[in-house]
Image (cartoon, grey):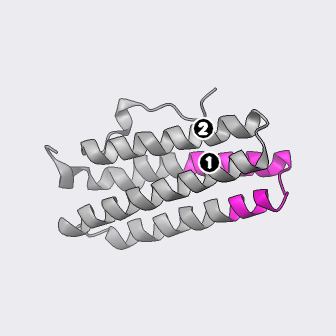
Amino acid sequence: MSLIEWDPSFSVGSARMDADHQKLISLLNRLYDAWHGGEDIAELGWLFDELLAYADTHFAAEEMALKSRNYPRLEKQEQDHVRLKDSVIAFRDRHLAGETPDALTTEMTAFLKAWLLEHILGEDMQYRSYFKGE
């Protein structure tokens, strides 16, 4: 069962950014499925690390693309990206420390789902006109 399903309405007008967002959703779904499937701590740790690594790659590309277009809300994007990374690291560290009660799973999945959807549908949609035709 997926936590988030990609929908064409999530498109921000850039094939590259849309592909990255689809990959982030896929990684989040894999983490969610592994967590609910009872995967061991090492597998979940690896999935957290994969999500963080891909987020780093995406955030760097997105920020560079926005900077090259003189996007006025770049600083807000950067702040949001730091907030997400810090939160994922905190969830990962709590998990690796053995703090994996159902409440943490629920808290983590609710936060990540809300953050990703709110960020794409809110903040990222605001740069859509900067990527017209790409």
The percent position of residue 108, horizontal first and vertical second, equals: 69, 51
Residue at position x 77%, y 56% from top?
Answer: 95
Furthest residue toward front: 42
Residue 1's place in the image compared with 63, above or below, is above
The percent position of residue 3, horizontal first and vertical second, equals: 60, 35
Position of residue 66 in the picture relative to residue 76 (left or right): left
Instruction: Name the quadrant containing residue 61.
Output: bottom left
Which residue position holds label 1? Answer: 47
- Queried whether the magenta region covers residue 92, the answer comes back as yes
Which residue position holds label 2? Answer: 30
The percent position of residue 47, horizontal first and vertical second, equals: 62, 48
Furthest residue toward bottom: 75
What stretch of residues is rendered in magenta? 90-114
Quadrant of the image containing the C terminus: top left
Sequence-wise first label, 2 or 1: 2
The answer to the question of whether label 2 and label 1 lie on touching residues, with beta carbons closer than 8 A, is yes
Furthest residue toward left: 133
Q: Secondary structure at mark 2?
A: helix
Furthest residue toward top: 1
